[in-house]
Amino acid sequence: MKTHNLIQGSQAWHDYRANHFNASDAPAMLGLSPYKSRSELLHELATGQTPDVDPATQRRFDDGHRFEALARPLAEKIIGKDLYPVTGSEGKLSASFDGLTMAEDTAFEHKTLNEALRYTPWDEGNGDHLPPQYKVQMEQQLLVSGAERVLFMASKWKGDELVEERHCWYTSDPAIRAQIVSGWEQFAKDLAAYVPPEVIVPAKAAPQMGLPAVSIQVTGSIALIDNLAAYGNSLTAYIERINKKPETDQDFADLEATVKTLKSAEEALDAAEAGALAQTESIDAMRKAVALYRETARSNRLLVEKLVKAEKENRRNKLLTEAAQTLRDHIKGLNEQIGKPYMPEIQADFQGVIKGLKSLDSMKDKLDTEVASAKIAANEAAARIGANLVHLVGFADYAASFPDVATLVQKSFDDFTAVVAVRVAAAKEDAAKREAAQAAKPAPLVAPAVPNVTHEAVVNLMPATVRKAIAAPAPAATSEPTLKLGEISERLGFTLTADFLKVLGFEATNVKAAKLFHEEDFPAICQALITHISEVCEQFDAVSA
């Protein structure tokens, strides 16, 4: 680990943090921080713009630093060694330590004791009870420093008096460490491709032009004095200005305000009608006008409500589709790098992360974070598959032993290498058995390749007594021929032809396509073959000599 002499909060400290991936930012990078989103961290590191710290937040920071300093002696007593605040880095990764021993084998991390920690079931185990953001931060501290463990402490002070303190030990978790490494790799790619979005002021409904008050008065002669015509013109003009194609949060906020204005128009018309009716029993023209404009207001309000709901759903679905496509494209690229479509299905809960959200901006932030998490998981799977395939290259001669390679490469490297070793050993054992069995078989009889030597020529080279014996007709059979030529060959273990048996003195009987011999001729056929083979061997020995 490389150490840096920096004063926390100084400009040099801020400049350093802007060029490193810090342990305190690791939870936000993985979408686990309750204080900062992944999108906000991307924006900060890409633009160098950090949010202003209000007085209340600064007081909380100051208290945290003071509590940390007060708690350090308590931690030194537990650890049994002195602790030194230090900032260190390992490549691009960085960590600021509340305390580190001189041997750099034990670190100290302090937090202000709050409600989230106070009622946590503390123990002396591996900090499994701690909120995940704290474990991620400490895991990166261990990764950067090479330390073996972290003493995690939470304390609360009143002035310099200790009110409450709790602590536990944390040691490295390989799964969390792998997640951090993959997460920063993906974050670096996203940071390089980051384009700051247009700054959008949070949507707030624009002031709505009020409709004129409805006025209906009844005179003593039951004459109506009203402004319904003017009111109707204003209502119609207002409706014509409604944005029927909302796209931004601002558009949706304006339309929701429009719904409220139209609802008020309905209520105002009802109230005016009721007031007029209280003055006279029936004024038909007035009631018709009121009914017309009330229905106009109502129908358009319902239309706008449906429009808002439909357009929000369309935008929501668009964001979901874009997130899913981004993940599919990433996995496709990984398959292309691997050279085979071996990538597993990567789970991403896009629907779940935006459940209950109303703002499109908040939906996009949650979806972007979920996409990043899925990419991290995909990158880990691709790295695992790649390592397994590289290992398998050394066993190309045993490819037949891995028909399920697409499934096998999904395993962890240790499990995969174990399976490969077992299957290769089995393949070698089977090959050795086949070689041993082959070696145990008698060598097949192979006639020397003598040019232009036919069976008839070999027979002519035999002694006359042998030729006479071979040519002697077989004894007459007394039964019907039933022995097939193929069956004779099968019994002997090699193929014979009817012509060859004819030379030996055994004539076949043709029955349709079959060539049949007498069963009682089989011993004589065998003896004739033995005599023939023996004489041929002797003859060729003489020729060779």
Image: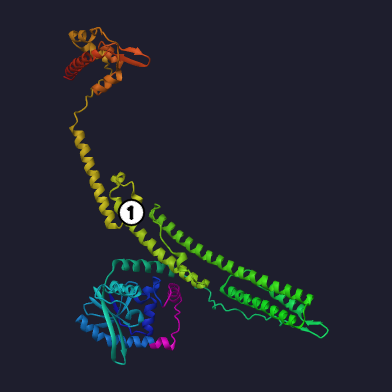
Residue at 27% of width from left, 80% of height from top? 167
Residue denoted by label 1? 409
Say what amino acid the circle numbered 1 marks. Val
Residue 309 on image: x %, y %: 58, 68
Relative vertical location of residue 444 with respect to residue 275 in this rendering, above or below: above
Residue at 64% of width from left, 70% of height from top? 302
Q: In this view, does 71 lie to the left or right of 359?
A: left
Range covered by the magenta-colored residues: 35-59
Q: Nearer the viewer, residue 446 or 34?
A: 34
Residue 338 seen from this side: yes
Residue at 26% of width from left, 8% of height from top? 478
- Dot 1, crowdedness within 10 Å: few (<14), some or many (≥20)? many
Dividing the picture into quarters, in which one does residue 493 lie?
A: top left
Dividing the picture into quarters, in which one does residue 277 lie?
A: bottom right
Q: Which of 525 and 478 is in front in this view?
A: 478
Q: Nearer the viewer, residue 134 or 333?
A: 134
Residue 327 on image: x %, y %: 45, 61
Image quadrant where one finds the N terminus: bottom left
